[in-house]
Image (tube, helix red, strand yellow):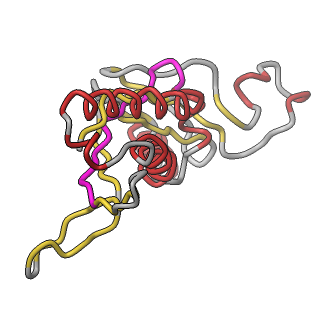
Amino acid sequence: MKFFKIIFLIITLVCIFSCTKVSQNEIAIRVNKIPLPTQLYPYPDFWTQGVLKGTITGGQFTYYLPFIQKIYKLDISPKILKLGESIEIRENKFEKCLRIKTSDGNNLYLNVSVRYRPYNFMAERIILNIRENSIDDFLEPLSVSAVREVISTYTTDQLIDSERFSSSMKKTRIKLNKKIQRFGFEVVSVNI
């Protein structure tokens, strides 16, 4: 009788810890951690290592097999990425600034922020490619190079002009979108 109580307790704990809730602003995928031979099982899509078919949308409960599978979640709400290095602006006040050399040779220190969001339909690719890494660490070099490519073609006087400045931000957003769309992200805006 004691043996059955222990087995019942173990099964209950496995059931409790084998489901999770995906919040409204998240998408998740279920990934097999242990590769198993597909020839031995009648359901190869279920047991092979990698992503199981389909994504789990927000607001749903999902199950997984502990120790065999893992749930990876991706927050799909828009995020802000600040570019540059921390520079002391005033005494004991630091801000992230990006140094850009304009076409007339001047160095500009700009507070640049990129607002981006992941595409819902590419969640599997994003999670598998950037699974353990920070998305910001992945996107920052691409964003810095796009901003520098566009801003460095203007002179300082041209950037002070509000019309040219807004057109340069639009060009930067378009160039950055071309660079990161294949990875599953969309740039909403670039602000300086």
First to last magenta residue range: 109-122
On-image quarter of the C terminus:
top left
Q: Nearer the viewer, residue 108 or 154?
A: 154
Residue at the extreme bottom of the image, as rendered: 91
| Magenta stretch: includes residue 7 | no
Q: Identify the residue at the far left of this view.
A: 91
- Whether residue 1 sits left or right of residue 58 in the image: it is right
Tell me if 49 is positioned left or right of 10 in this view: right
Does residue 4 appear in this view? no
In the displayed structure image, the side of residue 24 where residue 144 appears, left or right: right
Q: Residue at the location (82% across, 19% down)? A: 42
Asked whether residue 88 appears in the rendered view, the answer is: yes
Q: Residue furthest right?
A: 39
In the rendered structure, does residue 115 fall within the stretch colored magenta?
yes
Count of numbered badges drawn on the protein: 0
Up/down of 117 relative to 110, above or below? above
Vertical side of 97 occupied by 125: above or below: above
- Which residue is at a point 28% across and 70% down the rendered structure image? 86
**What's the magenta bit mostly, secondary-structure-wise?**
strand
40 to 154, vertically: above or below: above
Residue ID at (83%, 26%): 41
Residue at the (79%, 23%) spot, across then down = 44
Specify the quadrant of the image occupied by residue 22.
top left
Q: Give x and y (percent) for residue 77.
A: 29, 30
